[in-house]
């Protein structure tokens, strides 16, 4: 079915990526040098290919930190706005086409179900719009009546949304709506034919209530990559095997089984309190002509994940980026980024 509304898939041609830069008043304060170095690595890969919008506390500092890459500054847009944290995937607006016209939905971000402060991050999209970062023909749609994070959504661009029950049915997000009510709302605002709900799968240490972008991702309208656990001693084994079994029952928009490509389970990573961290190779970012995949200082599994993703992205270069610093705050590469389609920035 053809709808007047399109939620573009991540592989749709992009105009820009947004990063929200770490600063000393964020939770990164204790490791600001390590995490800034990680942001720089990611920023440079983006700047080589497209525009980069950096929401930051101090734009002069960001330009200084990126000074070795001044030759790429034509693609750099720095915007000073107050921020609580840096997880752009979840506090950024979500881009759609409505009857061919460009809109950005500004949903409520409530710190993943009222877990963390989000008052400043919840205003970033309005701030970007007010500073005219988006093209003149992009309309900002106020959707503050609904709590939604970008990490909870995977679109195939053909009317199907892949998400998780654990997140979207969380009582601290939209408790006034039933599952059917939430599905109806998503279908209406995103022009969907169907919503595929994953009922299994989680990562220890995940603050998001099982965002889909940590577990299973579309690579094209026929292909899903997903985290597979082969270790029966690992706490994730049962849940991820149930997730795999459910994925095998799903069909694409044509009614055919998906091509499923497994990603290795990342080696267990722990913080200083011996709490397991949610390292995942599913948290990759699609760019124009490239895919950035998070690495975790595990040469064998990092390369296995890169090669598995290369099978799904034959027309893109798959590049590993060390994201060990990011995982210390319970997120990874996709979590800190948000794409804007061609013509939006």
Image (cartoon, rainbow, N blue to C red):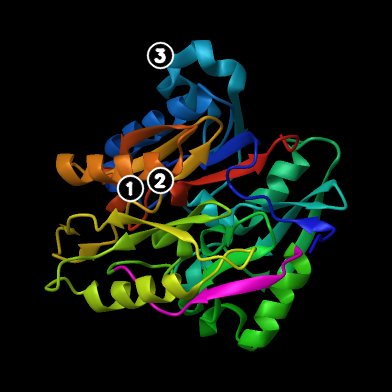
Q: Position of residue 53 (x, y in %)?
A: 59, 34
Q: Dots 1 and 2: beta carbons under 8 Å?
A: yes
Q: Considering only order in the chain, which callout, 2 or 3, is on the residue closer to the N terminus?
A: 3
Residue designated by label 2: 333
Residue designated by label 1: 326
Asked if one can make out residue 235 in the rendered structure from this viewpoint, the answer is: yes
Q: Which residues are magenta?
A: 191-203
Residue 90, by quadrant, is: bottom right
Q: Residue at x 51, y 10 (%)?
A: 71
Q: Secondary structure at mark 2?
A: loop
Q: Residue at x 41, y 38 (%)?
A: 292
Q: Considering only order in the chain, which callout, 3 or 1, is on the residue closer to the N terminus?
A: 3
**Main secondary structure of the magenta stretch:** loop
Left or right? Give the position of 290 relative to 323. Answer: right
Left or right? Give the position of 141 relative to 254. Answer: right
Q: Position of residue 319 (x, y in %)?
A: 36, 32
Q: Position of residue 223 (x, y in %)?
A: 49, 54
Q: Secondary structure at mark 1?
A: helix
């Amino acid at each position: 079915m053809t709808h007047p509304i399109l939620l573009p898939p991540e592989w749709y041609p992009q105009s820009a990526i947004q990063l929200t830069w770490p600063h000393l008043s964020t939770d990164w304060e204790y490791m600001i040098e390590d995490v800034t170095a990680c942001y720089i690595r990611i920023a440079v890969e983006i700047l080589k290919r497209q525009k980069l919008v950096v929401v930051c506390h101090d734009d002069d500092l960001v330009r200084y930190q990126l000074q070795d890459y001044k030759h790429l500054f034509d693609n750099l847009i720095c915007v000073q706005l107050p921020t609580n944290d840096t997880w752009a995937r979840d506090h950024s607006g979500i881009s759609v086409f409505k009857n061919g016209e460009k809109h950005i939905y500004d949903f409520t971000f409530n710190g993943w179900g009222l877990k963390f402060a989000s008052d400043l991050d919840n205003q970033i999209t309005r701030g970007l719009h007010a500073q005219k970062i988006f093209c003149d023909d992009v309309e900002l749609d106020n959707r503050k009546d609904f709590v939604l994070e970008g990490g909870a959504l995977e679109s195939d661009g053909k009317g199907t949304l892949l998400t998780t029950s654990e997140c979207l049915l969380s009582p601290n997000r939209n408790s006034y709506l039933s599952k059917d009510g939430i599905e109806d709302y998503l279908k209406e605002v995103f022009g969907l034919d169907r919503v595929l709900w994953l009922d299994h799968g989680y990562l220890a240490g995940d603050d998001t209530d099982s965002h889909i972008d940590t577990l299973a991702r579309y690579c094209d309208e026929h292909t899903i990559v997903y985290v597979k656990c082969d270790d029966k001693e690992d706490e994730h084994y049962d849940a991820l095997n149930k997730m795999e079994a459910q994925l095998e029952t799903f069909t694409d928009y044509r009614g055919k089984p998906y091509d499923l490509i497994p990603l290795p389970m990342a080696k267990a990573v722990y913080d200083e309190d011996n709490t397991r961290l949610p390292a995942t190779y599913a948290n990759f970012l699609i760019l124009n002509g490239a895919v950035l995949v998070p690495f975790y200082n595990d040469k064998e599994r990092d390369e296995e994940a890169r090669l598995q993703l290369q099978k799904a992205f034959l027309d893109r270069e798959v590049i590993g980026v060390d994201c060990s610093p990011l995982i210390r705050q319970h997120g990874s590469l996709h979590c800190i980024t948000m794409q804007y389609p061609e013509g939006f920035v």
